[in-house]
Image: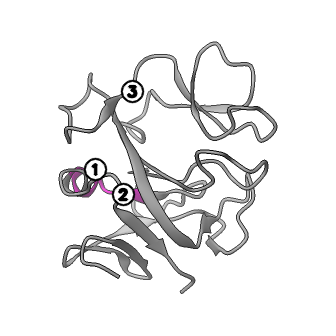
Amino acid sequence: MKPDDLVLTPMGVRFRGRRYPCTIGKGGIVGNKREGDGGTPTGVHRIVGMYYRPDRMARPASWAQPIYPGDLWSDASEAPDYNLLVRQPYVHSHEVMRRGDPLYDLVFITDWNWPKATPHKGSCIFLHQWRRPGYPTAGCVAFRPDHLQRIARQIVPGTRLIVRAF
């Protein structure tokens, strides 16, 4: 492991000498991720993208991309654009990226099952804002908003998220 790795531990994510409390998927840490299982997959996952809401915050890093109205993330296992950013109108199952709540105001995209997704292996594992401390995600890793923004200012494309079974 390197100091610039985000390392998930039972006490939170360790990054650059600090520990950031976080929440993970309601299904716990899983070695065999499947779409809809609520698990956070083990492995070394690289950060490949960062999206933010320009109507709610300043660009957190030079490489961050804005989330526009109509941006969606496909979680339709059988669709050809499964686990990719898509736009409305989109008839397949998806997540709305520009949400009414602040959960996706700032989102880091990992390379879990990306860019060529295997059907049913699980759509993207995001790093995003938590609902509240201890409230689980659908498989993503979630942080306090100020911690997420602090991390955003320090990571670069390719930063690794390391998830191991506890």
Q: Which amino acid does label 1 sit on?
A: Pro
Please say if 103 is above or below 122: above
Q: Quadrant of the C terminus?
A: bottom right
Q: How crowded is mark 3: few (under 14 residues within 10 Å), some or many (20 or more)?
A: many
The picture quadrant where one finds residue 25 is bottom right
Q: Judge left or right: residue 16 versus residue 32.
A: left
| Residue at the outermost bottom position | 166
Please state if 46 lies on the left or on the right of 61 as rendered: right
Q: Which mark is residue 145?
A: 1
* Above or below 8: residue 65: above
x, y percent for residue 36? 73, 52
Eye-nearest disc, 2 or 3: 2
Chief secondary structure of the magenta portion: helix
**As shown in the figure, which amino acid type bears the numbered disc 2?**
Gly
Q: Name the residue under label 2.
A: 158
> Which of the two discs, 2 and 3, labels the residue nearer the N terminus?
3
Cα distance between the residues tagged 1 and 3:
17 Å
Q: Do the residues labelled 1 and 3 touch (CB within 8 Å)?
A: no
- Taking the view exactly as shown, the residue that stands out farthest to the right is 78
Say whether residue 156 is visible: yes
Amino acid type, callout 3: Ile
Please give the residue where the numbered disc 3 appears in the rendered image.
67
137 and 49: which is toward the camera: 49
State the residue in front, 106 or 4: 4
**Residue 93: in magenta span:** no
Q: In terms of sequence position, does the residue under pointer 1 or pointer 2 come before the other?
A: 1
Q: Where is residue 55 in the image (x, y as percent from the top left)?
A: 27, 22
Q: Give the range drawn in magenta.
A: 142-149
Q: Residue at x 77, y 32 (%)?
A: 79
